[in-house]
Image (cartoon, helix red, strand yellow):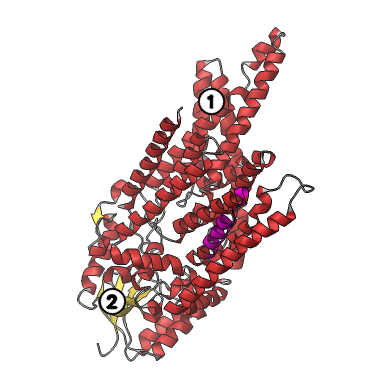
Amino acid sequence: MSRRAELLLASLIIGLSVIYQVHCAIHGFDLTDEGYLMSLYQWFGTDIDFAKGAGGYPLTCYLGWLLNFWTPGILPMRLWGILIVALTEVIVYLYLRRHFNPYFVLAGLFIQAIMVAGDPKPFGYNTLTAFVGILALITILEGSRGQHNYLLFLGGLALGVNVFVRIPNLTCWAFILCPFLVHFTSWKQLSWKKGISQGACILLGALTSLSLTWIWLTHIGADRHVVELLQSITGTLHGKSTHSSASLISTYLGNITSSIIIFGAFILCIIAASYAKSAVNKMGKICLFALSFLCLYQILYIHSTLLGRNLFALMNGIALFGAFPYLFSDNHKRAIAISSFLLSFLIPLGSDGGYQTMWVGTWMALPVGLCGLYECFQNLSNRWTHLSITLSIQPSQISSTKTLPLPTLVSGLIFCTVVMVVSALIKIERKSYYDPGSRSSKTTAINSPLAAGIYATSQRADIINPLLTALQDYVHAGDTILVYDSSPLIYYLTETKPFAGISWPCVYYGQAYVDQFIEAEKSTDKMPLIVLQHFYSSNYWSKVLPLYMDPEADCNFSSIEMTHNLLRVRKQYHYRQVWSNRYYDILMPAGK
C-alpha cells in the first residue's frame, strides 16, 4: 500500500474512533468520579478553598476550570477529552509507523481509543497523563537518539509538568534512564558518560518545570491543597479504603497474574484459528474458527467485569510479551519497546485498580506489542517455509507440512485481534462502567442546563430530576451546602460549594475528613443545608438502603468516624427533613 493510501486509512480509523467516542459521550450519567472532577473544575480558579481534593492533580483541575469557564457543561468537557484522545492517537501513530508495522499500530490505537468510550469522563487526569507522558517519552527518545540536548531538556520539562497533572506520575521520572536504553548495545560498549550526561539534561528540565510549577501553585494558593492531600493519604492506607496498602498490593499482583493467564488464552486461540486456516476439511475449518471465536469472546466479554478486567489484562499481556522480541532488535526499537512497556507499568501506580482504572498506560505498549507478535509469527512462518523447501525432496514431509499451523499464525493473530475489537465494542455498548446497561436504554434527559445533551436511564433520571427541582426552592448558585456522602455531581449541577471544601468525603477518608469538617464548622456562623443520600451511587445504583447511614452497617463510602460525625451534627443542630424521594433527603438546620 502506498504512503498516501496508508495515511488515508489511518485518517479513516482515527476518525471512526472519534465518531464512536462522540456517540458514547452523550450516554451515561455518573454522580461519583466524573461528578468529583466537575465539582473541582467549577471552583478551582475562583474559590480554590472549595476544591480541596484538587491537590492530587492541580494542573488537570486548572485546565478543567479554564475549559469549563469557556464551554460549561458535562458534554463539552467530554468533547474536550475526546480531542485530547484524538491528538494522542495521531502523535503515537506518526511516531510508531516509522519503526513498526503501521497496520498493527493502527489496530492497537483503535482498541485503546474505543476503550476510552467506556468511561463517560474522557477529559481528566487519565487522558491528560497519557498525552503529556507520551509527549515526554517520544521527545526524550528522539533527543537521545539524535543527541539533541534541547529535546532532552523539553522532554524533562514535560516530565516535571506531568507530576502535577497527577501526583503519582512522579514514577515516570524513570524515563530519565532512557538514554541508557537508546545507546545500549552491550555492557562492554555502554557509554556511561553519554548516558549520564543526557540523563542529567532530562533531570534538569524536570526539576526546572517542577520548581516553576510549584511557584505558580504557591501563587494561586494550591500548594497547601497538594500538601493536605498528601497528608490525607495516611488516612487511606488502612481500613476499608480501596487505596489501602494491602488492597493496592493485592490488586497489582492480581493484575499481573490475570495478564499472564489471559494472554496465554489469547495465544491458544491464535493457534486454534491457525489450524482452522490450515485445515483441509471445511467442517473442520468452521468448527475451529467457531471454537477460537467463542473461547476468546467468552473470556473478553461474557466473563469480563464492568471495568473490562479481562480486556485490560489482555492489552497489558500483549504489551509485555509482544514487546519481548524487540529485546533482540536494533537499539532504537528495543528502547521504544522497553520504555513503552515501562509506561504501561508505571502509570497505573497509585491507582486503586491498577491498570483497570488507569488504563491509558498501554497507548504505546499495545501497538508495539501487537507488532512484536506479528513479527515473531512472521519470522516463524518464514523459517518454517524455508525448512519445508529444504525437505521438499521427501514427499511424506510435503503432505505433513500442509496441516501445520506455523505458516498461518499471522492469520490467526489477525482473526483474534478482530475478535478483541468486536468484544471491546460490544462491552462498551452494553457494559459501560459508570452507567451500566445498554446505551439504547439511556434516552432520558437530566433537567439541568449543565447536563444538556447527556442522557441517562429513566430510573436514574427519576431519582435525580426531582431532587434538582426541589433544590431550586432552597439553594442558589454560590451557596454552600453539604451533599453526603457520594454524589459530588450535585454540587456541579446546582453550582453550589461543598461544605469544608470537599465534594467527595471518601477522598479524605476517615479522621482526616472529620478534622476538615470540624474546622469548617468552627469557622461558620450557620450550618449548611444537607442533601443526604440513602443508596449506593457508584456504577450500579442500588435500591434504597434503610441502613445506609448506620455506622455499623458498612454499606456506604464513609468510615465509622465520618458517619458518627454526621449523625452528631444532625442531632446537635436540630436538622429537620423538608423534602424526600427516599433516595435523597433535604435537611435544614433549626432557624432556617
Q: Main secondary structure of the magenta part?
A: helix
Q: Is residue 488 visible?
A: no
- Magenta segment: does it hold 103? no
Query: Residue most toward the right?
Result: 188
Q: Is the residue 489 above or below the residue 348 in the image?
A: below
- Magenta segment: does it hold 146? yes
**Label 1 SS:** helix
Q: Using the image as rendered, state which of residue 230 and residue 27 is in the foreground.
A: 230
The disc labelled 2 sits on which kind of residue?
Ile
Q: Quadrant of residue 435?
A: bottom left
**Label 2 SS:** strand
- Using a 10 Å C-alpha cutoff, classify the residue at mark 1 as few (fewer than 14 neighbours), some (14 to 19) or many (20 or more): many
Residue occupied by mark 1 = 288
The disc labelled 1 sits on which kind of residue?
Leu
- Using a 10 Å C-alpha cutoff, classify the residue at mark 2 as few (fewer than 14 neighbours), some (14 to 19) or many (20 or more): many
Q: Position of residue 338 (x, y in %)?
A: 63, 48
Q: Position of residue 7 (x, y in %)?
A: 42, 36
- Placement of the C terminus among the 4 image quadrants: bottom left
Q: Looking at the image, which residue is at 50% across and 30% down?
A: 415
Q: Which residues are magenta?
A: 145-160
Q: Is the residue 387 above or below the residue 211 in the image?
A: above
Residue 248 left/right relative to 91: right
Q: Using the image as rendered, state which of residue 131 and residue 243 is in the foreground.
A: 131
Residue occupied by mark 2 = 586
